Image (cartoon, rainbow, N blue to C red):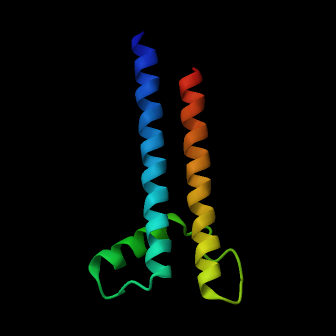
Amino acid sequence: MTTLARNTAAAARIVVVVADVVAIVIGLWILMYLLEANRANDLVEFVRGAARWLAGWSHDLFTFDKEWARVVTGYGLAAVVYLFIGHAVAGALRRR
């Protein structure tokens, strides 16, 4: 395996890991919200803040009557988009 191939494989792995971690953080916030986690807890607030920042472009995209539906769809869309784009970029890197 050439050095270039190793470097692109490593870059692809990094892109996949970053996309997966971002989706996990957003998914964790959705789960915490649905289970009504204590917002006074520092971990819950950290995850909420991180998810809000990561999904800032989509968290209020939909206007369902129920707040839980807005959270699941808005944040869920962001998680799916990060996964899709991250894995597509990684696949493109691997094909190089």
Left/right of residue 89 with respect to residue 31 in the rendered view: right
Residue 2 occupies quadrant: top left
Of residues 24 and 2, the one drawn nearer to the viewer in this rendering: 24
| Residue 40 drawn at (x, y percent) | 31, 88
Left/right of residue 83 with respect to residue 63 in the rendered view: left
Residue at position x 56%, y 41% from top?
87
Residue 58 occupies quadrant: bottom right
| Residue 9 drawn at (x, y percent) | 45, 25
| Residue 47 drawn at (x, y percent) | 38, 71
Residue at position x 42%, y 53% from top?
21
Q: Is residue 73 above or below residue 90?
A: below
> Looking at the figure, which quarter contains the N terminus?
top left
Give the farthest residue toward the front: 35
Give the farthest residue toward the left: 42
Q: Is residue 68 above or below residue 43?
A: below
| Residue 53 drawn at (x, y percent) | 47, 68
> Looking at the figure, which quarter contains the C terminus?
top right
Q: Is residue 53 above or below residue 40?
A: above
Residue at position x 46%, y 24% from top?
8
Of residues 27 and 15, the one drawn nearer to the viewer in this rendering: 27
Left/right of residue 61 with respect to residue 46 in the rendered view: right
Q: How many marks?
A: 0
